[in-house]
Image: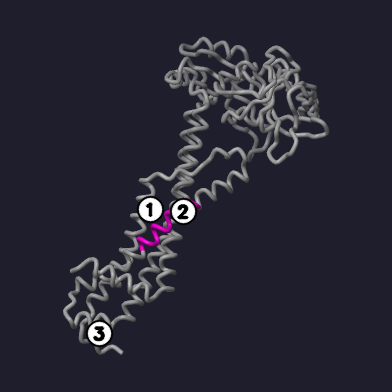
């Protein structure tokens, strides 16, 4: 059996039925291109997350107070209270643990900024400004910035606050004054109260990849304690281990001290959770693309089966002049293979282009994802290509078998 002859005859048969063949190839193109684009986007998103978290300090542990369960019926009653108060006593106790390098207390709250007739709601992260380098070692500031550690009127803005996405002019610049307002409920009277304080922008942070500070403003703990009405009760502690390898040990020591009364989170745990979510989401969207590819397989079955019915006399003639069943089988299987190869190859190019189009769409919606780009690994591309061609050939087995089993006499008598 001459394989070149088989492929030549198969290609001629597909060319005679241009429209039907093109539509069948298109089904394979759609499925394979979707798989390539979504696979590349998923891999790119994973790489983007890894890159962002690589900029975080791997030795930092985030400690918060766990919330007591609400005793009210059906979730009613007052808001749950913290199981433990994070104060200087807790800070000193954790600081005394082995392998703990530093404990950085912080206040956090939602505030409103007012600047030149504009207002913006954001998060305040009140810590010693010099400790920003512990949280984000790669942090950089715009030109003219200055870290004034002991100045209670100095405020540091993140880039997203100073330069809101989509705005032509900045919200605030270095050296400008602005006002911070904080609303709260007075514990004694139960009334809504408001505190406000004027600050001067001393620095603007460049994006760091750390979500804790990339969308926040920072001022020192003296101002935070007074403005946010904290009375020395911290919202969180950032515990710096001596090295990343000691994080697990320090986490266990803190857990031994406070049990479930305290919440502990590490950068590694956050990364693992996001990676698990990303993997699950990628698997889900790839399953949708696989369905599209299976639809293409059904199209191949329909096309080739119809072709068998239309070419019964041709098959009978080939058998009458000596063509073996294996030749007929190979002829129709090669048609399915050609459809699969054309569809998979075109799908590779379309999928790669589609991946970049999807990323451009994400970047236009979320400027924070501007560093995101699709990742097309050769192994992934080869897997999708092989799957597309394999499913195409699998879809062609029944029509090819049907053609090879036609008795010559019956085929020649067919009108």
Contact check, label 1 and label 3, Cβ < 8 Å = no
Callout 1: helix, strand or loop? helix
Q: CA distance from mark 3 to mark 2?
A: 43 Å
Q: Is residue 405 above or below residue 354?
A: below
**Is tag 2's residue or tag 1's residue first in the polypeptide sequence?**
2
Report the mark closest to the observer, 3 or 2.
Answer: 2
Mark 1 burial class by Cα count in 10 Å: few <14, some 14-19, many 20+: many
Q: Which residue has dot 1 on it?
A: 384
Q: Which residue has dot 2 on it?
A: 351
**Is tag 1's residue or tag 3's residue first in the polypeptide sequence?**
1
Residue 141 screen position, x and y as percent:
64, 23
Q: Is residue 310 left or right of residue 49?
A: left
Q: Which residue has dot 3 on it?
A: 411
Callout 3: helix, strand or loop? helix
Residue 345 screen position, x and y as percent:
39, 57
Q: Which residue sits at x=71%, y=15%?
A: 222
Q: Is residue 354 left or right of residue 172?
A: left
Q: Which residues are magenta?
A: 340-353
Q: Is residue 411 above or below residue 287?
A: below
Q: Compare residues 253 and 286 and report the one nearer the observer.
A: 286
Mark 3 burial class by Cα count in 10 Å: few <14, some 14-19, many 20+: many
Q: Compare residues 298 and 268 and report the one nearer the observer.
A: 298
Residue 231 numbered tag: none
Contact check, label 3 and label 2, Cβ < 8 Å = no
Q: CA distance from mark 1 to mark 3?
A: 38 Å
Q: Quadrant of residue 139?
A: top right
Q: Is residue 85 above or below residue 96?
A: below
Q: Which part of the image, by quadrant, shows the N terminus?
A: bottom left
Report the mark closest to the observer, 2 or 1.
Answer: 2
């Amino acid at each position: 059996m001459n394989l070149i002859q088989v492929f030549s005859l198969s290609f001629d048969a597909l060319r005679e039925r241009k429209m039907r063949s093109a539509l069948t190839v298109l089904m394979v193109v759609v499925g394979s291109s979707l798989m390539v684009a979504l696979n590349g986007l998923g891999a790119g998103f994973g790489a983007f997350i890894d890159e962002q978290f690589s900029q975080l300090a791997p030795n930092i542990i985030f400690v918060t107070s766990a919330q007591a369960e609400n005793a009210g019926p059906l979730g009613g009653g007052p808001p749950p209270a913290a199981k433990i108060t994070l104060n200087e006593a807790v800070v000193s106790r954790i600081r005394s643990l082995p392998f703990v390098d530093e404990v950085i207390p912080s206040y956090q709250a939602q505030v409103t900024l007012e600047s030149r007739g504009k207002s913006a709601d954001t998060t305040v992260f009140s810590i010693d400004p010099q400790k920003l380098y512990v949280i984000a070692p790669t942090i950089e500031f715009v030109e003219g910035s200055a870290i004034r550690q002991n100045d209670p009127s100095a405020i540091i803005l993140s880039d997203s606050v100073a330069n809101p996405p989509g705005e032509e002019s900045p919200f605030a610049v270095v050296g400008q004054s602005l006002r911070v307002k904080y609303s709260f409920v007075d514990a004694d009277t139960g009334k809504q109260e408001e505190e406000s304080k004027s600050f001067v922008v001393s620095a603007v942070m460049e994006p760091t990849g750390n979500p804790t500070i990339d969308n926040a403003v920072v001022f020192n703990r003296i101002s935070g304690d007074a403005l946010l009405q904290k009375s020395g009760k911290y919202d969180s502690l950032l515990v710096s281990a001596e090295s990343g390898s000691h994080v697990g040990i320090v986490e266990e020591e803190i857990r031994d001290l406070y049990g479930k009364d305290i919440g502990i989170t590490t950068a590694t745990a956050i990364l693992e959770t996001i990676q698990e979510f990303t993997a699950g989401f990628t698997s889900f969207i790839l399953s949708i693309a696989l369905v599209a590819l299976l639809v293409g397989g059904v199209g191949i079955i329909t096309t080739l089966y119809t072709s068998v019915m239309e070419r019964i006399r041709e098959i009978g003639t080939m058998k009458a002049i000596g063509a073996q069943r294996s030749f007929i089988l190979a002829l129709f299987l090669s048609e399915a293979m050609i459809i699969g190869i054309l569809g998979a190859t075109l799908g590779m190019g379309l999928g790669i282009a589609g991946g970049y189009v999807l990323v451009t769409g994400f970047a236009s919606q979320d400027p924070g994802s501007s560093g995101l780009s699709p990742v097309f690994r050769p192994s992934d591309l080869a897997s999708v290509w092989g799957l597309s061609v394999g499913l195409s050939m699998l879809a062609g087995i029944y029509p090819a078998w049907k053609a090879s089993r036609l008795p010559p006499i019956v085929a020649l008598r067919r009108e």
